[in-house]
């Protein structure tokens, strides 16, 4: 009888890859987790109980075939594990690093639910794909036949790139337009290197180029090139522009110097890590060194800002959030990482005013949680008379993002949007109100996750291929 390699969760404890000690990792922007050694990846994969109905898989937005690649890893069959993993995920090594697994696959693993500690799915996914890169198993697109149709993709974030990859593999001519000087979207300029090292993103972009995807960078659609021109040039268009309009604080004094937007702060830091010339960083405007920093918000962006400020050498870093720890939107794993690195979380608190032409302190209001709202979430209520003042030299607003008004910016009123300003697109086909125009990722969902953008991009590529296969429709436009 074959030796049982799986179901080891009772005897083998859950072990994440080693984290670098907080005092060391707080000095640089390198990733904080080391890679599993081969034996450890095998051992941790063997904890999976190979569920008949795998909840991990149903809670992964890509429905990754997790039990199968865990079994193959446990058996040492890594190339086959990689083949299965990449069949449903365009960038598995990226998702393995930055998906909030505690809210997705791992949070729903049955052995986590039974108190044994989840299978470390994300870390194994990263290990499989990093190994595939090392061994040359990750190949650029090499379509058997070139097709004459071309698709223009606006936005080089994960949504646009996942679609570009799938379309190119089908032989379609693909051009990706982006306003930044580097592709990758928020994976390049939003998410810090300590979660996702930049060479991991850049090697994917190099490979897309090697596979024949054309990138047109430093090109803001609506300014440098019109949306109409792009539609005229391509047989189909995909909008994947993300959401970048910062939700701003409304409080007296908010216009003071030293109160900055999270996206500007993180972009400057990421540019610095690339070795770019960043005057706003060098002048101190977007640099926390030697400053008392307050970050406002409780999501992933706020977590990234506080941990960036620590690495830049802030003298203190506090995170204000108006609900409590249990009700924050950010990943608990990231809160723990931030606390280890020296961030102080000030729960049930919100800024109500700022003092100084250049900010010198923040007036903070204390809250308590009241009755649940229509979504069931407890609403914060103000505790009257409990306000206090906290000194600060840099305040980072990390309250989330909203869509830009694309129909106006692009002079295309027929492009329908929802009441939140996100583009209206069919949730399966991703087709918008305009024929031959599709949309994916945050610009449709609102601020979301890389893994959802990848899923949308892959699905939209399928719909675009179906659309291109209907010549009458293409010719009719
Ligand atoms: P984006 O990644 O935003 O890419 C859109 C691209 O479109 C950009 O490159 C932009 O330059 C370009 N563009 C926009 N307008 C134009 C125009 N007019 N012309 C040309 N180009 C244009 N998700 C996770 O899963 N895990 C995380 O840990 C995580 N951390 C995050 C941390 C931060 C700080 C932020 C802000 C987000 C984080 N997210 C995280 C969310 C995730 O990054 C996004 O959900 C995802 O990147 C959305 O992908 P997208 O392709 O829709 O858009
Ligand atoms: Fe989990 Fe994300 Fe990988 Fe899916 S893609 S298995 S949610 S880490
Ligand atoms: Fe394995 Fe957990 Fe998925 Fe079950 S839910 S198949 S134990 S990883």
Image (tube, rainbow, N blue to C red):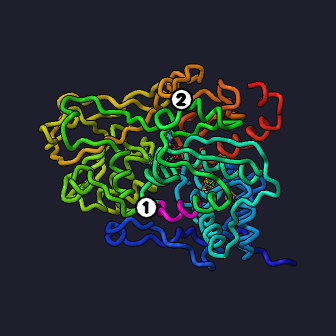
**What residue does disc 2 label?**
422
Q: Nearer the viewer, residue 24 or 342?
A: 24
**Residue found at x 52% / y 24%:** 411
Determine whether the residue tagged by mark 2 lies in a helix, strand or loop. loop
**Residue found at x 37% / y 47%:** 302
Mark linked to residue 193: 1
Q: Is residue 63 above or below residue 399?
A: below
Q: Which residues are magenta?
A: 196-204
| Disc 2 and disc 1 in contact, CB within 8 angstroms | no
**Residue 250 drawn at (x, y percent):** 28, 29
- Quadrant including the C terminus: top right
Q: Is residue 308 above or below residue 422?
A: below
Determine whether the residue tagged by mark 1 lies in a helix, strand or loop. loop
Under 8 Å from ligand 1: the CB of mark 2? no
Q: Is residue 452 above or below residue 126?
A: above
Q: Quadrant of residue 20?
A: bottom left
CA gap between label 2 and label 1 equals: 29 Å
Mark linked to residue 409: none
Regarding residue 116, the answer to whether it shows in the image is no
**Residue found at x 29% / y 56%:** 309
- Quadrant including the N terminus: bottom right
**Residue 106 drawn at (x, y percent):** 60, 55
Q: Nearer the viewer, residue 314 or 53?
A: 314
Q: Quadrant of residue 271?
A: bottom left
**Residue 403 drawn at (x, y percent):** 47, 32
Q: Quadrant of residue 41?
A: bottom right
Magenta span dominant secondary structure = helix
Regarding residue 145, the answer to whether it shows in the image is yes
**Residue 54 drawn at (x, y percent):** 72, 53
């Amino acid at each position: 009888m074959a030796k049982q390699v799986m179901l080891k969760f009772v005897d083998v404890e859950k072990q994440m890859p080693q984290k670098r000690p907080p005092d060391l990792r707080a000095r640089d922007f390198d990733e904080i987790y080391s890679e599993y050694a081969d034996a450890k990846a095998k051992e941790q994969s063997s904890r999976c109980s190979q569920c008949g109905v795998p909840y991990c898989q149903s809670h992964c937005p890509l429905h990754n075939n997790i039990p199968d690649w865990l079994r193959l890893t446990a058996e040492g069959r890594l190339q086959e594990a990689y083949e299965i993993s990449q069949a449903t995920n365009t960038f598995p090594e990226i998702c393995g690093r930055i998906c909030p697994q505690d809210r997705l696959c791992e949070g729903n693993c049955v052995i986590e639910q039974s108190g044994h500690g989840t299978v470390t799915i994300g870390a194994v996914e990263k290990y499989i794909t990093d190994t595939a890169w090392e061994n040359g198993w990750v190949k650029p697109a090499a379509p058997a036949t070139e097709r004459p149709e071309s698709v223009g993709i606006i936005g080089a974030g994960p949504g646009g790139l996942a679609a570009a990859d799938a379309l190119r593999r089908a032989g379609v001519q693909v051009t990706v337009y982006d306003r930044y000087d580097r592709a990758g979207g928020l994976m390049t300029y939003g998410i810090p290197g300590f979660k996702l090292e930049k060479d991991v993103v850049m090697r994917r972009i190099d490979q897309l180029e090697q596979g024949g995807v054309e990138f047109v960078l430093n090109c803001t659609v609506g300014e440098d090139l019109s949306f109409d021109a792009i539609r005229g040039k391509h047989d189909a268009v995909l909008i994947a522009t993300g959401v970048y309009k910062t939700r701003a604080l409304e409080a007296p004094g908010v216009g003071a110097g030293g109160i900055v937007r999270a996206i500007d702060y993180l972009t400057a830091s990421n540019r610095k890590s690339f070795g770019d010339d960043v005057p706003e960083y060098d002048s101190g405007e977007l640099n926390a060194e030697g400053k008392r920093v307050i970050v406002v918000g409780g999501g992933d962006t706020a977590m990234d800002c506080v941990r960036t400020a620590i690495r830049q050498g802030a003298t203190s870093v506090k995170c204000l959030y108006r609900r409590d720890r249990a009700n924050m939107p950010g990943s608990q794993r990231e809160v723990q990482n931030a606390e280890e690195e020296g961030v102080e979380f000030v729960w049930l608190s919100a800024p109500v005013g700022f003092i100084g032409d250049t900010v010198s302190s923040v007036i903070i209001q204390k809250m308590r949680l009241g009755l649940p709202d229509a979504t069931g979430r407890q609403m914060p209520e103000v505790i009257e008379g409990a306000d206090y003042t906290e000194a600060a030299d840099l305040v980072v607003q990390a309250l989330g993002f909203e869509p830009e008004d694309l129909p106006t910016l692009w002079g295309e009123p027929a492009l329908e949007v929802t009441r939140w300003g996100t583009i209206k697109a069919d949730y399966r086909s991703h087709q918008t109100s305009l024929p031959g125009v599709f949309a994916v990722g945050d610009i449709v969902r609102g601020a979301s996750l890389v893994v959802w953008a990848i899923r949308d991009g892959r699905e939209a590529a399928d719909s675009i291929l179906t659309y291109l296969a209907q010549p009458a429709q293409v010719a009719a436009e």
